[in-house]
Image (spheres, coloured by chain):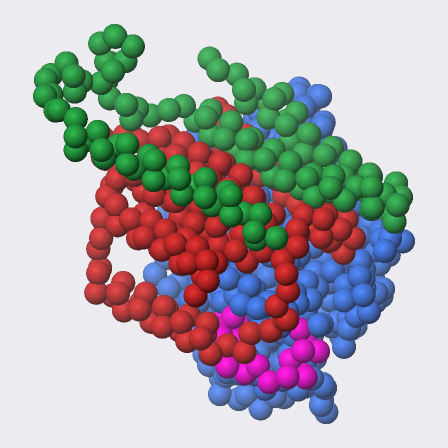
Chain colours: A green, B blue, C red
Amino acid sequence: MLEQYIPIFLVITIALIFAVVTVFASKIFGPQRPNKSKISTYESGMQPIGTTNERVSIKYYLVAMLFIIFDLEVIFIYPWAVQFKKLFGELGISVFVSMFIFLVVLELGYLYAYKKGGFKWD
Amino acid sequence: MNFTSDLYLIYPEIVLTATLIVVVLFDLIFKRSQSWLPVLSLTGILAAFIFVVMQYGTNLPAFEYSTKNSLLSIDNLSTYFKGIILVTSFFIVLFSIFSSEIKSCKDRHGEYYSLLVGMMIGMFFLVSSNDLILIYLSMELLSLSSYVLSGFVKKSIRNSEASLKYVIYGSVSSGIMLFGISLLYGLTGTTNLNEINTILRGTNVIDISFILSIFMILAGFGFKISVVPFHFWTPDVYEGSPITITAYLSVASKAAGFAVLIRFIKSVFFSGISQGGYWNLLSYFDWQVVLVLISIVTMTLGNFTALWQDNLKRMLAYSSIAHAGYILLGVAVLSDQGITSVLIYFAIYMFMNLGAFLVVMLIANKIGSENIDDYRGLGYSIPFLGTVLAIFLVSLTGLPPTAGFIAKLYLFVALVDAKMIVVAIIALLNTVVSLYYYIRVLKNMYLVKDVIKTVHIQLKPLSFVTILLLVIPVLLFGIYFTPIVDFAKLSIQILGL
Amino acid sequence: MNIYDLIFYLFAALTLISAFFVVTNKNIVHSAFYLLFTFFGVAGIYVLLGADFVAIVQLIVYVGGILILLLFGVMLTNKITNVEIKTGTINIFSATIGVGLFAGVLLAAVLYAPWKVTLLQEPVSTTGILGNLLMNEYVLVFELLGIILLIALIGAASIARR
């Protein structure tokens, strides 16, 4: 089975080599004449305001948490879905029920965050 | 395999999960009627308690996936600890009703009660789980809820600090425990406790990696029961958290930790039982020496550090570390008698510790401080609360005629029977040390007159009843203790041995 | 030494070197980005071990999710008290002793442990096996996971909202 991964590995290697070579080649071969406006931050032609690492709102944290939790949910659904036909033959409706309970419990959390105004940005 | 036939064995857990869902939904739908949330939680706890009582005496594996391998074991030990957890939760919900700290966060009560129920579910699975994966997961559920709860009052910096410290220590220790579990899995190829026992009997795996994995898993349990050297979080978290949560952590979470520790030792290392109910353990790991050392250091450190504390909550935190040391001695005897004394101790410790925290909370609601110096003369201005606090503190010391004496008596008898006289003497000396700091509070309350300020606390009927519910067992079990002892003797049964 | 050994050493080197930079780098944001390579290297090692599903999970959850959370965490706490959050090194002596001892014990444990040996077999896709386990032996664990995630979400909502 590991042979299947060789193309992926090759792609990763080529991508890495390409990225490293282009970045460093332009640095080595290209002419470098920096001036003040060249090295300033590019912000769509506007004057940059402040620095880049500002504090962000705590709301982002909730969004990131939600993202991870639903990430995990999908990850648990995936192997279930792959085996669903076989499991349904063996266990019947209870395969469906156990996943349903899992999903209901999780959606309850989503509903909670939504109703409590976790997504309100004001 | 179909597990629907096993569902009746986890009715208490199902009831609690249903409570969790109902609390969350209720909070979403009826935003205005927050005062019904504790009632809902209490109903769920009572319903679960009925099922637990009905389950007592059941001795069956639940979710058995091959012979002798089950995820849960429903036996008397787990049922006993479930009972302790439910009674504690019942009192904690009552406490929360009249805690001014919790009241100050009006719109977040739904979160509070749902996290509380989440903690209960975690502890329920923890005390009956028979599989390392389930042990780890339920411990995570328990920790996760308690991290958030210990920082519940967000406006209070003290709360946030407690929560942050708890998260850091907790995640490190659970990471170490997970590493230990993975090492153990690598050595034995299974996560089931009984199966690990079978493998240990068959082959010779004694070597450094095995010992290391056991120590790492012990670190995870040790964190939950806050024994030295995993106790550093305890004073800060106990001092910073809302008092209801402090009381909950010091009783219920500790009980769950001890239950899983006992089950782990007995299920994994048990090889037979000798005369007098002493366990013969597989000789891979000398539990007795390790546990005795840990418990002696724990109780000595807890008691001596408590001497210097001026904050009553922090003092009670160190005292709870010391009590964890005493209880661990009961485990270290490694006999049925020792476990009996642990069970008796927990039943009594629950009442007296909850009671002490309740009185501290009621006084702090009024005077806004837990400083021992602020307790000057309180014995005269609030005679009832003063007397009750005195009873609880005397009981925590272990003096007759309170229940604390019975708890310590059975512990020392178990120690002496196991010919651990020196250890018993050290524990006794520790008790003498503890007398000093408990009495210091009483001295401040009764012997130091403070004429300038007088405090009047008007007790509501509900809080009065709660105090009576806690103080009567403490006095009653000090005199009439046969039922609790008999009950504990019945409850040491562990499945699969 | 065949091609798989070579790939293993590549990924191991990637993991170790980037982990070293995570620890030594003074800027937390840079550390977080080096962590990306550490996670990635570990994912590669999972693939070599035949744990394909775990490798994908490692990529999706850790590289995709946890790292974002980490970066948000850095950005949330940035400039709270006019103090630039930087990592420093203190107590080098005691730390070296502690870490050295722990590493020695771990190394000894790994080298001399009588690990449970199973016969070498051609790796198969593990997704279906996991699906079977989740629905059969560990269905209780699966439902408990749902509750844990719900509690995590409620806790996060409790912390994040005003």
Asked whether residue B455 is in view, the answer is no
Asked whether residue B426 is in view, the answer is yes
> Looking at the figure, which quarter contains the C terminus of chain B?
bottom right
Q: Residue at horizontal 82%, vertical 41%?
A: A85
Image quadrant of residue B77?
Answer: bottom right
Q: Nearer the viewer, residue C55 or B179?
A: C55
| Residue A106 picture location, percent across and down | 67, 34
Q: Nearer the viewer, residue B486 or B129?
A: B129
* Range shown magenta: B196-215
Where is C4 relative to A43, above or below? below
Question: Does the magenta stretch mainly form a helix, a strand or a loop?
Answer: helix
Q: Residue at horizontal 66%, vertical 19%?
A: B32
> Looking at the figure, which quarter contains the N terminus of chain B?
bottom right
Q: Residue at horizontal 25%, vertical 15%?
A: A42
In reply to whether residue C147 is colored magenta, the answer given is: no
Where is B342 relative to C58, above or below? below
Q: Nearer the viewer, residue C42 or A53?
A: C42
